[in-house]
Amino acid sequence: MKIGLVWECPWTPSSYGKLALWTAYGLLKEGFSVRLYCPSMPEMSLYSRCVDYTVKCLHRSLGVCVDPGQPLEVCHSAVACNDRDVDVYIIGGTPFGRVESKWVEQCSHSQKPVAGYFVTETSIVQPMLAMWLAHVDAVAFPARAVAEAFLAHEPARELHKDWILAPHGLPDYYRTLTPDQILDYGLKAMDSGDAERLKPALESRSEGSLYGTIAKDHPRKDYAALLSAFALLKHKHPGRKLRLFLGLIKAVGAPMWNVDAIKATLGLADDDILTLEPRLQETGITELGLLFAYSLLNAYILATLGEGFGLPLVEAGSLGIPIVATRTPVIEELWEGYPLLAESKPIVVSEGFILYGTDYADLASKMEVLLDENSWEKCSKQAKATASRYTLDRMVEGVVKLGTRWTGW
């Protein structure tokens, strides 16, 4: 059986890119044939419409590698849902996103079954947008809160009463590696100049005072709330070397945040905020680079207006890095029982989405808890235990159910 996965390109350094690669890898392990369709692949290569993509693992000795053991067949998404040798197509992403909506529209005319693996950041999807579900034969969601957002309207609910839960999941190295192993490996590979630039981060880390986030530059990521919470905490603890690492990724997302202006308004010094090199902000960072950045932190902080899943929280938590995050329906579901979710209030934004405004004072209060060593240890164990629920095997199991619904495989 051949499954056509219409999503992000497997080489793209983003959550969607990784999920596409990991899902393809998991499906191949289960004995399926896979073809990926993605937007940054050329529409036509010299001799064919598709190319073979081979995963090159430079850090296999550390274990940071998802290698399918064979080339992945990748085609441009413009030709998705037209190949006769594909048995079922699965579209990933947000169906009302500009790119994904084109996929849903073109695939709705396919002669083959088409399924959706959909996310949303709003707690209720507008009725007309929710009816994108009428264009797919079956659907899976990564969280119940996401399903409820799409199926809040009766017509959509009637179409997909039998939706499938398929939480996003991580490969094994997130659970087997430790931050110290990753840092040791990364520091040995660095040149002296890069290692020198890390000294302030390592100084704060050794004191238990380095907070941080790695997230795209996007209107849904609330950098204003994060910086405000950090400034409040910094003012309250002048004797500590509190620093905030901002891994602001501009390679994906939509330009939004002027961090320098917010920093100046809040009275934060240049030395208080550590950032990625400009080059890495523009290109994105590799999987090892991301793991290294997580491992630098004493705590991963996500102030957000809304999440479809919140993969970085699970990634950081899997490494035993305590997390602090805005309380949204999805995050509250996935992190049920975890103590460091900051209070928020629902707000309606101009697009008609219901999102969540972070209480930055409560965010600062939750961050302050982790300055106590005993509390840090407790939350580290809780974060790791919670994140351990979200495995690649569990995600692939849900995707297999979605893809084989029509076949009796």
Image (cartoon, rainbow, N blue to C red):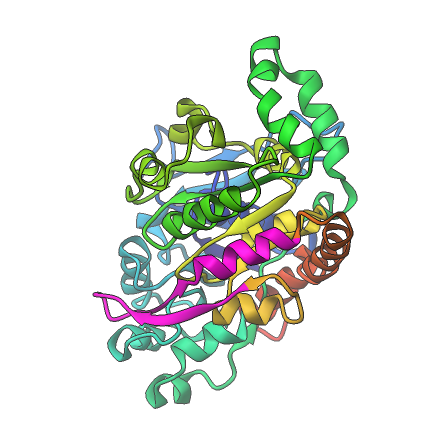
* Image: 277 above or below 138: above
Closest to the observer: 124 or 48?
A: 124
Q: Which quadrant, please, contains the C terminus? A: bottom right
Position in image of residue 27 (x %, y %): 62, 55
* Image: 134 above or below 5: below
The verdict on residue 368 being magenta is yes
Q: Please indicate, yes or no, whether residue 30 appears anywhere in the rendered image.
A: yes
Position in image of residue 357 (x %, y %): 38, 64
The residue at the point 26 percent across, 66 percent down is 349
Closest to the observer: 365 or 278?
A: 365
Position in image of residue 256 (x %, y %): 28, 44
Position in image of residue 326 (x %, y %): 49, 61
The residue at the point 33 percent across, 57 percent down is 100
Q: Which quadrant, please, contains the N terminus? A: bottom right
Q: Residue furthest left?
A: 350
Closest to the observer: 155 or 349?
A: 349
Task: Give left or right: position of 274 versus 122.
Answer: right
Range of magenta residues: 342-369
Task: Give left or right: position of 300 versus 102.
Answer: right
* Image: 348 above or below 69: below
Task: Give left or right: position of 398 versus 175.
Answer: left
The verdict on residue 260 being magenta is no
Q: Please indicate, yes or no, whether residue 141 appears anywhere in the rendered image.
A: no
The residue at the point 67 percent across, 24 percent down is 186
